[in-house]
Structure formats: structure tokens, C-alpha cells
Amino acid sequence: MLIDTHCHLYYEDLKNDIYNVINRASDLGVNKFICVSTNLNDAEECIELAKNFEPIWATAGIHPHDAKSAPIKFENKLKSLLNNKKIVAVGEIGLDYFRGLTDQKIQKKYFRKQLEIAAEMDLPIVFHNREADEDIISILSDFPGLKGVAHCFSSTIETAEKLIELGFLISFSGNLTFKNSKLPEVASKISLSNLLVETDSPYLSPTPFRGKPNEPARVRYVAEKLADINNCTLEEVAKRTSENAIKLFKIV
């Protein structure tokens, strides 16, 4: 069994074909899905999908790109969403200094506020980090005991090791499979006990589908790449990463 720990199933092409999306994933051994929101409206769609489909779970949170247009007083609405029984994490939250769609001060403000809520509600976080390593590590260090995952990891082994020391898991997506990617070298130095796999659907389709819309079934290709890197079987990667996901998100 594989778990796609990060997919955006509320995107129209996926949502409108959700029965086939789930069936194609099942055919490749992918049996559970974490539908990750990027704003509060998305979170409601994630919850609706999770209510209607048993193998789908949901998150609620405000992405750094969406922080610029987020309600100033969002806390009560977010907490209400997080109380849903199919919600398993606060996310997608974090910092993105690469695209710079939201002022960094605003990004950090919303990131901290959501970390406070996650700590208060004893929920793990799903966080985005793009060219913001130093601030991510600094801010997360202020929340000892908080758990979660660095989604779609694309940084250095040094950053990965610091995040693992803080108690976070590392998740790889299709970019692990890209030609000339430096991520396989990073992945080779991280124990499977600290890893998750994901698609980030509909983005980041793995090789040989790069450039095409992604879907959860293709998390298998990420897992196969990890198996190759670790010189182990696909079954071992599936077992270890699924155990990690089940433990982190408390899904059954």
C-alpha cells in the first residue's frame, strides 16, 4: 500500500474525474490520499471530498501565496474547519521567497499564527519551503514538540537534517525523478524512517510523465525511485513510508 500524502484533488480536472482517479491509483497500489488545501475555501472542498470518499483525508490552512488575500481574522474559521473528523493536519502553510507573491513579513505572520493553532489543537503541519530555509528553521525552532512534514522537499541535506532534528519528516514528489536532479543524492542520506512520498497533483508529474498533469497514481514512480536509491524493494518503501504517514496523520 502506498499513500499519496499531498495532492490537490479539488482541482477541476481531478475532482470531475475523481472515481477514475481513485481507481487508477488503486490499480497501482495507492490506497489513501491526503487532500491538501491552500486557503480556507479549498479546505471546505477538501473536507467535502473526504466526507464522500473514505480513502481521502483533508487538511486546512493558508499557503504563503494565499496569505496576501487571506482574511485578517481567520483564526476562528480555521479552527472550525480543523475540528472536522476527516482533517488530519494544518496545511499547506509555510514560506515561499522564490516567487515572492506575498510580502515576506505577511508570510511569516500567517505562518506563525497557524503554527500556534496547530500546537494548540495538537495537529501536525504540512509546510511549504522555497528558498526560505533559514527563516523556516528559525520559526519552527520556536515550536518544540510540533510534528509535521516538509512537503515537496527541494533543499539541501543540511536543511533536511535540521528539520529531522526538530522532529519533522521529509517528503519527496516527482522532482525526485527528474533528470539532473540533485535530490537523489539528498534522499540517499535520509533514512526511510524519516520519509514520506507524494505527488503534489496536479503538479510535478514524475518522469516519464514530466510536463503532463499529475495524479495520485503516479506516487508509485516516486516510491520506485526511492527504492532504487536505497537499493531495496518497492514493497519496503511502501511499507515504511505508509507507516510514517499513518503515525503522523493518525489515519487508519
Image: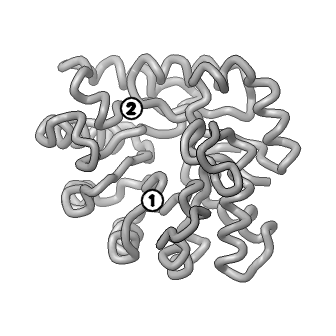
Which is more toward the observer, 221 or 245?
221
Work out which quarter of the rendered image holds the C terminus and state it. top right
The disc labelled 2 sits on which kind of residue? Gly
Sequence-wise, the earlier of marks 1 and 2 is 2
206 versus 85 height, above or below? below
For disc 2, the marked residue is: 61
Quarter of the image for residue 174 reads bottom right
Q: Residue at x 48, y 62 (%)?
A: 169
| Label placed on residue 124 | none
The disc labelled 1 sits on which kind of residue? Phe
Which is more toward the observer, 213 or 42?
213
150 versus 159 height, above or below? above
| Label placed on residue 153 | 1
242 versus 84 height, above or below? below
Residue furthest toward the right? 27
Horizontally, residue 209 falls left or right of residue 161, namely right
Q: Residue at x 76, y 71 (%)?
A: 236
